[in-house]
DNA sequence: CGGGGCGTACGCCTTTAGACCTAAATCTAC
DNA sequence: GTAGATTTAGGTCTAAAGGCGTACGCCCCG
């Protein structure tokens, strides 16, 4: 216990950050060494503070969790990352795990279990929520959402704001025909039947703010 | 300081509850006397524990925050309610305030401000986030979403799951024509142009889970 | 330099959505 | 018990959405 586990807390909600900090600091073997509110700040803080474990929320404004994960890997930061989020969509879960997360727990874990998860991850284990493990096992297939081209993402973002094809066309300076082509491609790739389902998908995966 | 403010924390996320509890207990003049994970439990706990202030999240599974608020009022529970949530939609904010909330803050407040808010509310003040105050001042009009009939809400919930009119019809045992009538009414009442916008609205207001 | 993915765009066709109108049965409230 | 809201359902019509096929210029990668 001479060396407490150094934790960096990353979440865009101050209340959640402070809450996690307050709770984790009660653990004798865990010390919260810093907080960050977005991906960029997280990478910077991790470089400076060299935490053992990064507690990372995936949904954040600006640079999101997956980007932060990639940033850490690129810098060869040895911190182990425990993702804590509420997303269950394969399209958001799988990239996070593949980007090198050492653990994935849902936000509804109770705090003692969270502390245990931090210890497990620090000990070198990979800790996955059962649902996530199942996804990994079953879904060898690439998550559909990840295969959208940049342009398709732009179109989907517009659709997810409730825009009609015509409005999307004007917003992106395209012909309506082209928008329809993109929308069709999006529907096929996401495996959904219509634009409403696509919009809901986009919201669920955090492509646009709820 | 002989009488600390007795607070009941209501939120469906254990991490948030524990976090709030841990932080608030650090305040000399605040004591967290209990927690609840949904509206029913909140009302029951408030009856038993007689807290001075209830910290209430609006978005919860089962009985939601507004229902809990109404439940407390019906029982003439003297607890003052501080709503803490992330919703900015008028349709969700206004009913909460009108149901008797003594305060309304967004979830991105920093913890010291939250503690101050609890003290203000306990002192008898009504504390509103500036945006909420503006809504109240400007929007004398009833929030559109609140005027949906029960049946219309059911239909909207189906639409917000990405169902087509035909599928909604089968699910609710109606003719497709009736569904279209309901959908048209919903669109008019919500002031939106199509089912996709209605679905997004439903998600934002917590009618269905994101 | 030849594929392959990407972005753009058109045409034809069918299905779906949604507006507007009417109207009956039911229920609730005063 | 009558007025008003709710739920149900139909008709007609127009606009929007979406499937399917085709095509062409680009750029990158082997």
Image (spheres, coloured by chain):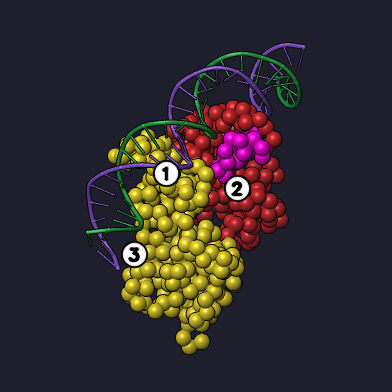
Chain colours: A yellow, B red, C green, D purple
Report which quarter residue B101 is drawn in: top right
Which-is-in-front pick, marks 3 and 1?
1
Name the residue carrying label 1: A183
Name the residue at 36% across, 77% down. A77
Helix, strand, or loop for circle 3?
Answer: helix
Q: Is residue B47 above or below residue A129?
A: above
Which-is-in-front pick, marks 1 and 2?
1
Residue A107 falls within the magenta-colored stretch: no
Q: Mainly helix, strand or loop, the magenta region?
A: helix
The answer to whether residue A112 shows anywhere in this view is yes
Check whether the beta carbons of the residues at disc 1 and disc 2 lie within 8 A of each other. no
Name the residue carrying label 3: A40
Foreground residue among B155 and B93: B155
The answer to whether residue A35 shows anywhere in this view is no
Q: Which residues are magenta?
A: B151-171
Check whether the beta carbons of the residues at disc 2 and disc 3 lie within 8 A of each other. no
Q: Which labelled disc corresponds to residue B12?
A: none
Helix, strand, or loop for circle 2?
Answer: helix
Name the residue carrying label 2: B65
Label 1 – label 2 distance at C-alpha: 37 Å
Residue B156 falls within the magenta-colored stretch: yes
Neighbourhood count class around disc 2 (C-alpha, 10 Å): few under 14, some 14–19, many 20 upward: many
* Residue B184 drawn at (x, y percent): 55, 28
Label 3 – label 1 distance at C-alpha: 32 Å
Neighbourhood count class around disc 3 (C-alpha, 10 Å): few under 14, some 14–19, many 20 upward: some
Q: Residue furthest bottom?
A: A2
């Amino acid at each position: 216990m001479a060396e407490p586990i150094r934790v960096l807390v990353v979440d865009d909600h101050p209340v959640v950050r402070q809450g996690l900090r307050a709770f984790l600091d009660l653990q004798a073997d865990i010390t919260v060494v810093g907080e960050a509110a977005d991906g960029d700040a997280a990478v910077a803080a991790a470089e400076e503070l060299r935490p053992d474990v990064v507690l990372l929320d995936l949904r954040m404004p600006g640079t999101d969790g997956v980007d932060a994960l990639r940033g850490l890997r690129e810098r060869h930061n040895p911190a182990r990352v425990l993702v804590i989020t509420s997303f269950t969509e394969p399209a958001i879960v799988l990239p996070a795990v593949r980007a090198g997360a050492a653990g994935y727990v849902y936000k509804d874990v109770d705090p003692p279990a969270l502390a245990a998860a931090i210890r497990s991850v620090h000990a070198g284990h990979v800790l996955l929520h059962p649902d996530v493990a199942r996804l990994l096992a079953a879904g060898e297939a690439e998550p559909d959402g990840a295969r959208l081209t940049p342009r398709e993402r732009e179109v989907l973002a517009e659709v997810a704001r409730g825009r009609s094809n015509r409005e999307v066309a004007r917003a992106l300076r395209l012909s309506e025909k082209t928008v329809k082509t993109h929308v069709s491609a999006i529907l096929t790739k996401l495996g959904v039947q219509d634009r409403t389902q696509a919009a809901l998908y986009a919201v669920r995966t955090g492509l646009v703010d709820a």
